[in-house]
Image (tube, rainbow, N blue to C red):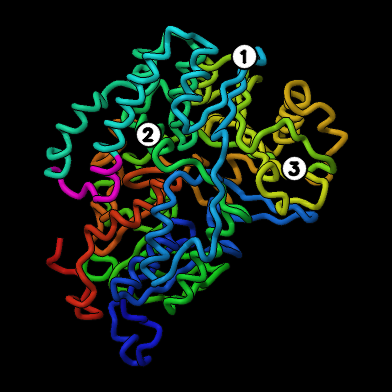
Amino acid sequence: MTDLTTLPAAQRGHRPHAVVIGAGLGGLATAIRLSARGWRVSLFEQLDGPGGRAYVYRRDGFTFDAGPTIVTAPFLFDELWALCGQRRADHVTLKAMDPFYRIRFHDGTWFDYTGDPQRMRAEVAKFCEADVPGYERFMRDAEKCFKLGFEGMAETAFDTFGDLLAAIPSFTRMKAWNSIHTLAASHFTDPKLRIVFSFHPLLIGGNPFSVTSAYALIASLERRHGVHWAMGGTGALVRGLVDLVQGQGTPIQYNTTVRKVLVTDGRASGVELEGGERIDADIVVSNGDTAWTYRNLVDAAYRKHWTDARLARARYSMSLFVWYFGTKRQFPDVPHHMMVLGPRYKELLHDIFKRKHLAEDFSLYLHRPTASDPAMAPPGCDAFYVLSPVPHLDSGTDWKAHGDRYRDAIAAELERTVMPGLRESLVTSFYLTPQDFQDRLLSYKGAAFGMEPLLLQSAWFRPHNRSEDLEGLYVVGAGTHPGAGMPGVLASAKALESVLPDAASLVPGQGLRGRR
């Protein structure tokens, strides 16, 4: 591959120009892929550093990844390094997790979820020996969903109605109209096992009782490729991607907010920054929240499809309350990834997704990176975050008034169940609420994962990678196809390539007219 950074400045300047909004994982991956295809790229980020939802906080000697920490598709990262003529393994070490997760039920029993079929059968038998054959059947369905839903769909944009028609046989074979909990219930009789084999969509903003059974593919993805931790945290992957972006000659401007997408002759022609500076471009790619992008960056006159009314009618994912804390001692009985489930499951999810009601009880994802990577905390200490799914801002919750009480309730529950002596061990602590997802991350309604991944809000029904409304505008990230989670976000940048022409075929400054 040609090293574009070695070309003469004049020659570099005559490449078609793409503006990318947002230096999250999707924006960084897009910048790398566009540069490798011959585009000149400018990348703007409104925060003071890269990562977006994968931002890194450093407090009192502790390192906290803001959000995504579970690496399940390392090959998608490997591809980005390979596009730049490098090997990811030379820069970032991935450590395999064992177990992948521990799912702890309210009665104190737990399931250690791994990629080893023999150990998984033994775990299933602990709860219901008669369900072991059901595990085998479920994994066969999960493998089918992986081949049809991930390998067959994730990396190609659903750009036309014909793309949807071509995918209908695959959706039919996956019985995608069923929910993933319905799929699990068809194979397992034990209620706890039904939870174990259907909880995964919660990690990408979906209600297991509503999202399509196609998301069983996650179980197959994990068994095929494992669950990994990036040594140094997800931030190490972000820093590695930043190095790749900058090594291709792409500047990243932080603390720079894009105010609107410019339109000339009915197509995106650049962006205007908050300070009034106008940046011309042949295409604009937004890695910002998709609903926010349309509502706030694209004038309503150019939105016949994604109108304000249509965006308001869509169903959005839950939000998150995330408490980050460090302790002056270690908790060795807590594994790296742990689900701490409350007394209610289906009823709690109904409160969150349907009623938009902040309940008194909760189920938690507890993350202890120092179980695998002691460097994330000072010697003898532990770093944690605990994540509680909560309704997005349609709940009407005043998080400024309620945040401390909610954190204290979580602390009390963790201390009662899996972390005795927690509160007296705290040395640093802060949290993010749905209000922060809206105000800091510019996420519509404070939803943490964009639109909820329902069947009729997936694939062709999800906001397209190539805008339905404005020629020259493209979107990547959690809010577009294929969806949220690190694999989905990285795959969205790859799907984008399927609807872009080769840069070499374009005349800079003339855009993409006639190429839809």
Amino acid of disc 3: Phe
Question: From this viewpoint, which residue is outermost toward the front?
Answer: 118
For the residue pair 416 and 281, the one nearer the viewer reads as 416
Marks 3 and 2, how far apart at CA: 33 Å
**Upstream in sequence: badge 1 or badge 3:** 3
Q: Which residues are magenta?
A: 150-161
Q: Is residue 291 visible?
A: no
The image position of residue 53, as x and y in percent, is 54, 50
Q: Position of residue 361 (x, y in %)?
A: 64, 20
Q: Tell me which label, 3 or 2, sits earlier in the chain.
A: 2
Q: Quadrant of residue 456?
A: top left
Is residue 402 shown to the viewer in this render?
yes
Q: Where does label 1 land, which residue?
A: 343
Marks 3, 2: nearer the viewer: 2
The residue under label 2 is 220
Front one among 291 and 63: 63
Which residue position holds label 3? 325
Queried whether the magenta region covers residue 158, the answer comes back as: yes
Q: Residue at x 24, y 27 (%)?
A: 174
* Callout 2 amino acid: Ser
Is 393 situated above or below 138? below
Q: Is residue 437 left or right of residue 482?
A: right
Q: Count neighbours of disc 1 (C-alpha within 10 A) and say few if under 14, some if 14 to 19, many if 20 or more.
A: few
Which of pointers 2 and 1 lies earlier in the amino acid sequence?
2
Q: Where does residue 168 sit, x and y in percent of width and height?
A: 16, 33
